[in-house]
Image (cartoon, rainbow, N blue to C red):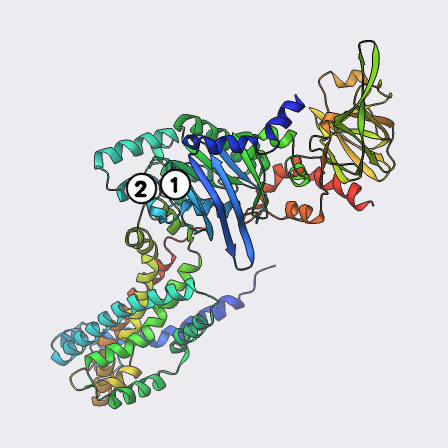
Amino acid sequence: MKPSRLPLIVTWAVIAFFYVPIVILVANSFNSSRFGGSWESTSLKWYVRLMNEPSIWHALTNTLAIATAATLISMVLGTSAAFALHRFAGSKLQKLHYSIIYTPLVLPEILMGLSMLLFFVALKVQLGLATIAVAHVTFCLSYVAMTVLARLQDFDFAIIEAAQDLGAGWWTTVWKVLLPMLAPGILAGGLLAFTLSIDDFVISFFVAGPGSTTLPIKIYSMIKYGAPPLINALSTILLAITFLCVIASQYLSNRGRPAA
Amino acid sequence: MRKILAAETSGSGVRKRRTQRPVSEFLVFEDVSKHYGAVKAVDHVSLTVKQGEFFSLLGPSGCGKTTLLRILAGFEQPDTGRVLLGGEDVTDLPPYERKVNTIFQSYALFPHLSVWDNIAFGLKVAKRPKREIKDEVARMLTLIQMEDQAWKKPDQISGGQKQRVAIARALVNKPRVLLLDEPLAALDLKLRQRMLIELDLIHDEVGITFLYVTHDQGEAMSLSDRIAVMKLGKIEQLGTPAEIYEAPRSSFVAAFIGDTNFFDGTVAEPLEKNSVLDGFLSVAVDKDYSRLKIEDFPDLECFNDKQIKEGEHVFLSIRPEKLRISRERPEPGPHLNVIEGRVEDVIYLGSQTKYWVRTGDYRISVIRQHSRFLLDEKPIRWGERVWVSWHADDGFMLEKYSEQDENLIQLPPEEVGETTESNQILVRAPAAGAVPAGAAGR
């Protein structure tokens, strides 16, 4: 009997549904026409224009600075959280801890953004890069913690004992054994956090201050002033960065696991 | 023969002598206890291991053998007692300050390091000169015959090789004691037998004291100089493999080590010793032997080394290979016990045949070695009436073999794959079969 073609058709339909809009956007970023409806000629015109737009450069620097800071902080905090969660799994306190870590993954962003804004205002904190970075840590941390926790599940703790048994003190064990073994997990979580931070619009929008425009906010404001070809080019760049990070993250989180 | 063994193992004579000579006390556990909640993992254990000895802690899962090893390694703190190594109290030292190294059941190799770096780990941590590290690691790689695999990662080598790397990684630090925690449990039968021989060779070569933890009596018997059989956190019996097998001090040991038959009986009067002295016949009480009454059996004789009193209830334990089976009633002899039965099952095993003989409520397991060409002698078949006989010295009067003992022995080994079961079944399973016939039949 011939295998049914239905699954194949459905698969392609789903892929099309997801990616056709993105493909159109990417294609249009290379279209020299101002309007997406007609194809004039292939050109990098919009990318060149993008290069000469200082406000975009400024937004990009902001975004990268925030993403880097948020990622580094959440890597440290997330890893520590994962350790506590794994080591004391089953205790009541850790069950609560787990819920706290898990909640940001499912909480509506708009709620987080709004509550964070109210929080900062109540504390009379000057809104700016720092507040965005802190806000990003709140959800990035959860992703790092979850990725590292997954790796800890199949971590053989006899290895830690083996290191101590061979004469390694606590510090040496952490640096020579624990961190190198968990590094792929921590990095994968970090990259995930990095992409999420770069992409984030809603939360950033709430807690951004004057002069701390990030790339997604910039794109949004550009739409208001109507510059679609530029946005296409910018989005394509953002898309490329995101894809690279996700691929690297997946590669890392699979590496070093037992093959079986 | 029997009396010599009994003399050696009986009482605390051996241990007492040792406490008077503290020089030979290389590794000492002194009144060590460890509780986990309400569970007594180790219950006031005192134990002395000699330098260079291959010493095994043997017992079913949950008997505390691993806990005792982890206390020596420093991963667990005892609730009471102390541990002395070479005269020095190491009870409070952290694991990384103890001159002992462990081989873990899961090997616990560092997956991110090559074989070479795994072996070098201990020396690097100890900040030894580069030159020395290189030489020592090379020496170890030669010992485990893995020179050409030095740069492979642990997930690129086989189970047996991982095992060898784990041994090298521990030995390279020249530990005073090498601790082995069920090191062969994760290997399949063939590989396990090979590693047994290798472990033995390595022990002979390096001369380090080995403390070996296992639930597999076959491993313990073939490797050890001495064995401590443990049950519920206590040492049940301590001795050489032969002492423990030949002269078990409790029914638990008799059933756990090897295979045995149990008979439920009551001690009767001591035997009379007839002797002709100066032409007169003198009758004296022979305290070494007692009569034993077992339901459905004729009166039996048994060696009574523990001076068990008349009227006491005992379990008589006799190893299957100590029993003789024959078609004709054997000639009566001194201290020879004879009972009659019917063959219920015959299992031909090549070098030996195993018979199950039914007498009353008992199903007796008898092993017969074939030292002669079997086909000439018209082997005993199923359903035949036979005589089973044994010398009174080969029976042991032990305390009751309880259901609790049986449950302990039947426990699955902890965290071990199904491969480890196979050789246990060959050696030990009949013990389980012999008991219900005696114990449950009543």
Residue B314: % across, % down: 75, 39
Q: Is residue B178 rendered to the left or right of residue B285? A: left
Q: Is residue A37 visible to the viewer in this orientation of the structure?
A: no
At a point 61% along the width and 48% down the height, the residue shown is: B412
Q: Circle 1 is placed at which residue position?
A: B101
Asked if residue A102 is positioned above or below residue A245 in the image, the reply reads below
Q: Is residue B103 rendered to the left or right of residue B193? A: left
Q: Mark 1 touching mark 2, by CB under 8 A? A: yes
> Label 1 lies in what chain?
B
State the quadrant of the C terminus of chain B. Answer: top right
Disc 2 residue type (three-letter):
Gly
The quarter holding residue B305 reads top right
Residue B34: % across, % down: 50, 52
Residue A106: % across, % down: 41, 78
Q: Circle 2 is placed at which residue position?
A: B122
At a point 69% along the width and 24% down the height, the residue shown is: B351
At a point 77% along the width and 40% down the height, the residue shown is: B312
Quick one: label 2, few (<14), some, or many (20+) residues within 10 Å?
many
Asked if residue A187 is positioned above or below residue B401 in the image, the reply reads below
Q: Nearer the viewer, residue B409 or A244?
A: B409
Disc 1 on helix, strand or loop?
Answer: strand
The quarter holding residue A2 reads bottom right
Q: Is residue A15 visible to the viewer in this orientation of the structure?
A: yes
Disc 1 residue type (three-letter):
Asn
Which circle, 1 or 2, is nearer the viewer? 1
Q: Earlier in the sequence, mark 1 or mark 2?
A: 1
> Label 2 lies in what chain?
B
Asked if residue B226 is positioned above or below residue A188 in the image, the reply reads above
Q: CA distance from mark 1 to mark 2?
A: 10 Å
